[in-house]
Amino acid sequence: MENNDNKLISKKKPAYPITDELLKYLTRHGRTIKIPIYYDDLLRFQGSVSVFDKNGNDTLWVSVYYSEFETEEINLSLKKVYSILHSDGSDTIFPYLNIDNIDFCTFGNSKPFRIKVRNILNDNYLYLYIKKADASRIYGLELEDLLSPNHINFLVRKNTLIEEHISGIPGDDFIINHLDNCSHRDKMEIAKEFVKFNERCFVRLLGDMRSYNYVMVLTHDFDRIQYRIRALDFDQQSYEGNAKVYKPQFLKENNKLVEMTSQLLQQTSIDQYIGEERSLLAKRATSMKKRLKGLMSCMKNDTISSPEKVKQLKMDLFELTGDVKFKKARNMGEVVQSALDFVIRNYKSENPYILS
């Protein structure tokens, strides 16, 4: 694998509104629901204090607080949101829930609120996130749910997006504090997963997978630890014009993983894992054909990037693949559709066991 530190990612991506067609799609598939609180309601905090990590470093999150009158109302509404997202929406569990913290992120495009909800009976807790809705991110979330091995749970209501927490070790933390302590076997597994993650992002055009935008998920099997890289940030779904932005290997924050992968895996193994991941993507796309078709119809009728970026990306991909469908694409939705069609077509043509 190769890397390059000079790929440019837009410092500020505009938020794109949810179209009527996309809203109908989300409603049809149970992604929209009435909620008792909106993103803008949480912006009415009275003050805040900085949140530091265990080493005393500023996390760039702040813990916010509200007036006494609003605190009670907001906490009750957030318990309702939790019940809708994780249960049947009833209020029977409210007495057992406590809103421990409401944190606000001071950087990034989505400016999310992070809500810590604790069960007072056993002290178990989890997080949920409330963000300003952005069509790009919603397409990214939905494509992740349909095409990756990961399930994504989210809800939309007008300008508000609610997401469940994705558990794992932040990628930058893992690279700095854990990677060097991994065994040779574990590093081989991580290298394999990085190749697959790299290809998965590229095919579905999810950009900006710098190390702090994904997590490493460890699963203990009976004779080993399995590693999976999961995307956290979906704001850069099909927005940038430079094709290399969609490959994590070209982002300097991932250099250590790239170097390790190049040292441990032969090119034949890398090609094998790329082929495996493309086959899995093709299988998922085929099995979810009807729903994916509905999503892509929304995306092809939507605007989620500039004409200049669309032109650059489609020509980059045309030069890479020679597939004229990229050259004919008129918007980002058609570019993504062309990428999926390319992978599915090659999978079917190269697999003699597939029945057409």
Image (cartoon, rainbow, N blue to C red):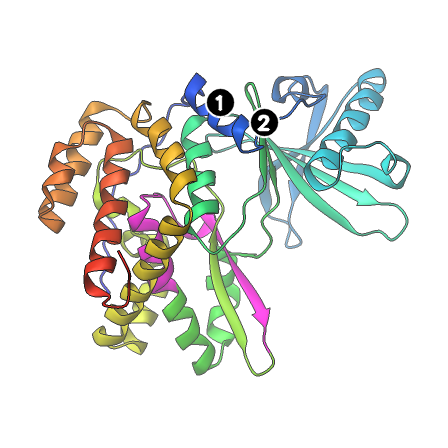
Residue 353 or 205: which is nearer the viewer? 353
Q: Which residues are magenta?
A: 194-221
Q: Does 269 appear above or below 346?
A: below
- On-image quarter of the N terminus: bottom left
Could you tell which of marks 1 and 2 lies nearer the N-terminus?
1
Does residue 256 appear in this view? no
Residue 41 rendering spot, x and y as whole percentages: 67, 18
Circle 2 is placed at which residue position?
Answer: 32
Q: Is residue 311 left or right of residue 334?
A: left
Q: Was residue 210 drawn as part of the magenta stretch in this picture?
A: yes
Which circle marks residue 127 in the picture? Answer: none
Circle 1 is placed at which residue position?
Answer: 23
Crowd class of label 1 (few under 14; some 14 to 19; many from 20; radius 10 Å) = some
Does residue 66 appear in this view? yes
Disc 1, SS: helix
The residue lying at 51 percent from left, 25 percent from top is 133
The residue type indicated by label 1 comes to Leu
Quarter of the image holding residue 278?
Answer: bottom left
Residue 154 rendering spot, x and y as whole percentages: 58, 37
The residue lying at 20 percent from left, 57 percent from top is 346
- On-image quarter of the C terminus: bottom left
Residue 226 rendering spot, x and y as whole percentages: 52, 71
Quarter of the image holding residue 353?
Answer: bottom left
Crowd class of label 2 (few under 14; some 14 to 19; many from 20; radius 10 Å) = some
Residue 312 rendering spot, x and y as whole percentages: 16, 34
The residue type indicated by label 2 comes to Thr
Q: Was residue 20 drawn as part of the magenta stretch in this picture?
A: no
- The reply to whether dot 1 and dot 2 touch (C-beta < 8 Å) is yes
Measured in 3D between alpha carbons, the distance from the residue under mark 1 to the one under mark 2, in whole angstroms, is 8 Å
How many numbered circles are shown? 2
The residue lying at 47 percent from left, 69 percent from top is 179
